[in-house]
Image (cartoon, rainbow, N blue to C red):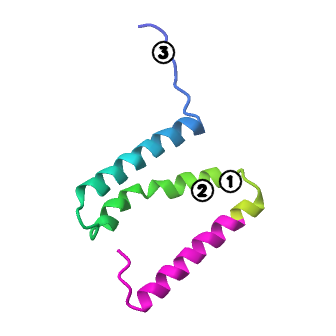
Amino acid sequence: MGPTRKRDLTAATVFAAVAGYMFVVLAIALVGTKDFQGLGRYVLAAFPAFALVAERLTGSPRSLRHAAIACSGLALVLAAAGFAHGLYLS
């Protein structure tokens, strides 16, 4: 057998793979549902995106990390307020 090369998985390679996976998952969910009522359960498969975003934010400036946390918190508060007022969010 000849020499084998180990493939080095760089952050860009992992990012491209996860981005492709997310695109396919979202495309299947958007094309496969006619009324978007069950879209949330299908899009849940894109959860690894949060790990990718966290990995990308580790090397970023502190202000960008704080802005990302603030935006995420604001989205959580708005979604919770909508749910509390009986809005159908799905």
Where is residue 66, by image quadrant? bottom right
Count numbered badges in the picture: 3
Towards the viewer: 18 or 75: 75
| Main secondary-structure element of the magenta-colored stretch | helix
Q: Point out the frontmost of discs 3 and 1.
A: 1
Dot 2: few (<14), some (14–19), or many (≥20) neighbours within 10 Å? few
- Residue 28 lies, in percent from the top left, at 29, 51
- Residue 37 lies, in percent from the top left, at 27, 71
User: For mark 1, what is the residue?
Assistant: 58
Q: Secondary structure at mark 3?
A: loop
Task: Tell me which numbered mark, 3 or 1, is placed earlier along the sequence.
Answer: 3
Relative to 53, say whether 67 is above or below.
below
Q: Secondary structure at mark 1?
A: loop
Question: Which residue appears farthest toward the top when viewing the image?
Answer: 2
What number is the disc on residue 69?
A: none
- Residue 9 lies, in percent from the top left, at 54, 33
Q: Amino acid at mark 1?
A: Thr
Q: Secondary structure at mark 2?
A: helix
Q: Quadrant of the C terminus?
A: bottom left
**What residue is drawn where x is 46% and y is 54%?**
48
Task: Tell me which numbered mark, 2 or 3, is placed earlier along the sequence.
Answer: 3
- Residue 23 lies, in percent from the top left, at 40, 47
Is residue 55 located in the magenta-colored stretch of the structure?
no
Q: Are marks 2 and 1 in contact (CB under 8 Å)?
A: yes
Q: Which residues are magenta?
A: 66-90
Dot 3: few (<14), some (14–19), or many (≥20) neighbours within 10 Å? few
User: For mark 2, what is the residue?
Assistant: 54
> Disc 3 and disc 1: Cα gap in Å?
33 Å
Side (left or right) of 35 relative to 46: left
User: For mark 3, what is the residue?
Assistant: 4
**What residue is drawn where x is 36% and y is 53%?**
26
